[in-house]
Amino acid sequence: MNMFKLSKKVQSLPPYLFLEIDKAKRQARAEGRDIIDLGIGDPDQPTPKFIIDALNRAAQDPANHRYALDQGMPALRNAISGWYKRRFNVNLNPDAEILPLIGSKEGIAHFPLAFLNPGDVALVPDPSYPPYKGGTILAGGKPHLMPLLESNSFLPDLNKIPFSARRKAKIIFVNYPNNPTNACASDEFYAQLIKFAAKNKIIIISDLAYSEMAYDGYKPRSLLEFDGAREVVIEFHSLSKTYNMTGWRIGWACGNSQLVAALAKVKSNIDSGIFSAIQLAGVAALEGPQDYLKSMCELYQERRGVLVNGLNSLGWQAIKPRATFYVWIKIPAPTDSISFAARLLKETNIVATPGVGFGKYGEGYIRMALTVSKERIKEALERLKKIT
């Protein structure tokens, strides 16, 4: 008999589907099966060499072996400020409006602790990156789901949020370019969102992790570029996808100084900052040669063409992304997304992520990531002919 009882908050967390997917993958590989993993979005290309070299140099310095400051090194905050100015023409005060994070995921999950009291509401898109909902629940808040529907270009319909939810809402999550749907936000939507937040006294949490992964000349914008954003927005960014640094765990929050300071207060009671050598590698990434980004986008764009065109030629309905390295696909069979993903693994040795793992409105879809070679994508398409 189990004598330890989980807290009600932990009990109410939805299952973290990626753990189940990883378990199934490991089992399949243990059986000697040739798995093509189009599941979790983890870049298959290495971190650029100049960033690794910067880490090696910094790791040799004993001064970097001590506890790091919670607020991050001034050099990193200055590098982030410079990058935002060059990329978005947004001026950020590196001392008050920027907070480095141990990956943007932890900051996003911790932020609700700063503002949600029991019973408060967070407006959460569905489908969405799981920490939006999980962070809300762990803070004692209640997620109010905003459906992301293809009929509305996978944008939340702010006009359909009931007054009862608006009245109790303290925060709203947005993520464009979007994971998992790969949708992009229009300028009109961002302007409407800022007015909505200001009118209802709601904090906007903008997750901009995929801003540098875009195609066909499209350049995603920061929400901080828009009038009125500085009053209501905290924006999260990450080096994970931009520089193939997922395992390094480095990102940041920026924007409204009061919101940044509130997150810093939470974090000061939880962690002790990013390893200093990794911070200096982050400086190198942001201030070093950026031509790598162009070649990265060209690589994913080529893979995108192979996968999307191949799926559509099989009669599937795959949405061609303008950004992110995800393809959002309608299930081509009368079944649910978990059953269909299980069938793919069993019959074709292909891993895809069930849409329902991102929320109930993700049902009817699967997500595939462009994180394997063009040759492996072609092999996957050959295998998919067996079940089409």
Image (cartoon, rainbow, N blue to C red):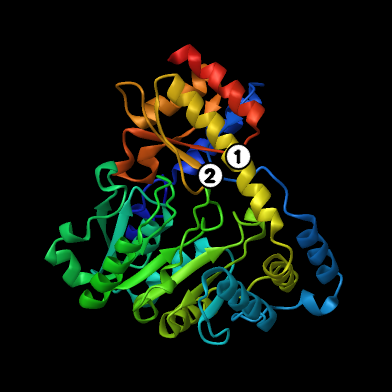
- Picture quadrant of residue 114: bottom left
Image vertical order of residue 261 relative to residue 365, above or below: below
- Picture quadrant of residue 109: bottom left
Q: Is residue 293 left or right of residue 116?
A: right
Mark 2 = which residue?
A: 325
* Picture residue at 34% right of the left edge, 79% below the top: 228
Seen as rendered, the residue at the extreme front is 217
**Residue 104 visible from this viewpoint:** yes
Q: Nearer the viewer, residue 116 or 218?
A: 218
Q: Earlier in the sequence, mark 1 or mark 2?
A: 2
Image vertical order of residue 220 relative to residue 111, above or below: above
* Picture residue at 59% right of the left edge, 28% below the top: 377
Q: Amino acid at mark 1?
A: Thr
Where is residue 92? Give x, y as percent: 53, 81
Label 1 and label 2: CA atoms lie apart by: 7 Å
- Picture quadrant of residue 95: bottom right
Where is residue 43? Give x, y as percent: 63, 46
* Picture residue at 69% right of the left edge, 80% below the top: 75
Image vertical order of residue 368 relative to residue 322, above or below: above
Image vertical order of residue 77 relative to residue 244, above or below: below
Q: Are marks 1 and 2 in contact (CB under 8 Å)?
A: yes
Q: Secondary structure at mark 1?
A: loop
* Picture residue at 30% right of the left edge, 62% below the top: 188
Mark 1 = which residue?
A: 371
Q: Nearer the viewer, residue 142 or 180?
A: 180
